[in-house]
Amino acid sequence: MQDVRGVPVSYGNQAALDRYEEALLTLHRFSYDPTPLLKSIMAVYPDFAMARIFMAVAIAGGSAGRNIPKLESRIPETENIGGLNDRELGLIAAVRKRCAGDWRGAQLAVDAVLAQYPHDTLALHFGHQLDFLLGDALNLRGRIERILPHWDESMPNYSHVLGMYAFGLEECNMFDHAEAMGREACERDTEDTWAHHAVGHVIEMMGRHEDGIAWYGNREGDWATGDGLSIHNWWHLCLYLMEMEDYPRILEIYDTYITPDDSFEPEPLADSNSLLWRLMIQGVDVGDRWRANGERWRQLIAAGEGGFYGFNDLHAALAFAALGWNDDLADLEKRAIAQSTQSHTLGNIARDVSVPVVRAISAFHEERFEDALDTLDAVRPIVARFGGSNAQRDVIDQTMMAAAIRGGLGSRAVSLANERLSRKPHGPLARRFAERAQTII
Ligand SMILES: [Fe+2]
């Protein structure tokens, strides 16, 4: 059989495939977690291999590490169904590489599937997520460009391909094209929160904070529901509000939507950390809000997340530094060092990026501001390798400016502020940094 995009599937039950499409739509829209629906599909159709592979891809497309043993242990069950086609086996190979820490290998395995099946949007989504997790801007854009000539607007999920393309273009700083693609994707599917978010990124990077508040405010019904990307989109709205120093509104949003609880996975927890840290840099009193962050990181680290993925380590370090939890900070550094001894993608990232970044946050916490700035300056050209978006990694730039200002390093503070002002000449936050830098010259 084939799915609605003409991609071969080794299971011949149309009712099962129809439910698979429902789950795929939630995945592409980032509207809801598709895994509960997939579980119910697998319960009714236990021999439907693609449902199992989809479940594995949905999990492997996130940054968590603690679920790897379970993920790996389920692969043989899927293979034992028998009769899997080369596309399905290719996706399993990519999941296996992701489980082994070979995330670059996983990217290439997905590439191999897409070269043969350019309409396989599950593979495309998986590749897009891996590219994001590795801060790989060229592939965020290029992966879509490699398959786009095989598509036209009459095909199912065309808009979701455009939404991914919009984000990839934005991460390559091709803002005009990105915004056009993102807005077209949103018009074609108003519930596509990934496409909405891609336009939000363009607006953020161009320093158009008033446009951003309007973009989010006018479309709140389309992005603020669901459990996929809504927390992250609230976080994006807060970035625009940071420009306007609307701290009461930010704290209200934080308390309503972004305060972590035991259900928070590393991705929303990182956003929560990042927002509190940015507020702290601006001198905003966030009260006792850090505690819930630190407690949740402790739980996740005890479960196996510490040292696993560098972008998450940065954010755990921010929480521990803000709380003054020095033992947790030291333990996190040890875990990142242990990861750095592994000879795979994640080990290389830990060695080159995560360990220095965690050390820099420790130095910042100990008020060794020049050390913190030197360390971040050295790692900054390659910091994208530990993942996240340009907007998320801006927390590094803001920390560097705070280190320069607090450390009385006037000329370096001015240099950093000049750089920011040239990118966001109308940005109030850039101006505030520049004004502070001038006071210590
Ligand atoms: Fe984002």
Image (cartoon, rainbow, N blue to C red):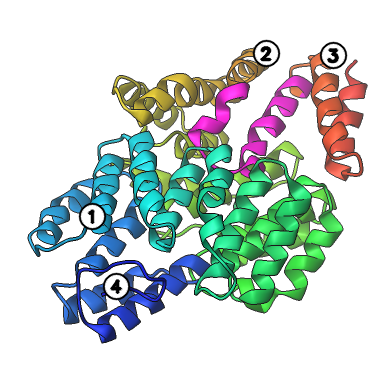
Q: Residue 225: horizontal and vertical position, in percent?
A: 56, 75
388 falls in the magenta region? yes
Q: Looking at the image, is mark 2 or mark 3 nearer the viewer?
A: 3
**Residue on which disc 4 sits:** 38
Mark 4 near ligand 1 (CB under 8 Å)?
no
User: Which comes sooner in the sequence, label 4 or label 3?
Assistant: 4
Image location of residue 190, percent across then percent down = 64, 76
Q: Is residue 215 above or below residue 205?
A: below
Q: Quarter-wise, where is residue 58 in the image?
A: bottom left
Residue at numbered disc 1: 86
Q: In 3D space, how far apart are the residues under numbered discs 4 and 2 (Cα atoms)?
A: 50 Å
> x, y percentage for residue 104?
38, 35
SS at circle 2? helix
375 left or right, relative to 86: right
Q: From the viewer's perspective, is the residue at label 1 or at label 2 nearer?
A: 1
Q: Amino acid at mark 4?
A: Leu
Q: Which residue is mark 2?
A: 370
Q: Which residues are magenta?
A: 380-405
The residue that mark 3 highlights is 411
Taking 399 as reference, is 78 above or below it? below
Quarter of the image that includes the N terminus: bottom left
Q: Decide which of 149, 191 is in the foreground and name it.
A: 149
Kind of residue sitting beneath label 2: Glu
- The x and y percentages for residue 51 are 26, 69
Contact between marks 2 and 3 (CB within 8 A): the answer is no
Give the amino acid type for the residue marked by disc 1 in the picture.
Asp
Q: Residues within 10 Å of mark 4 (few under 14, many from 20)?
A: many
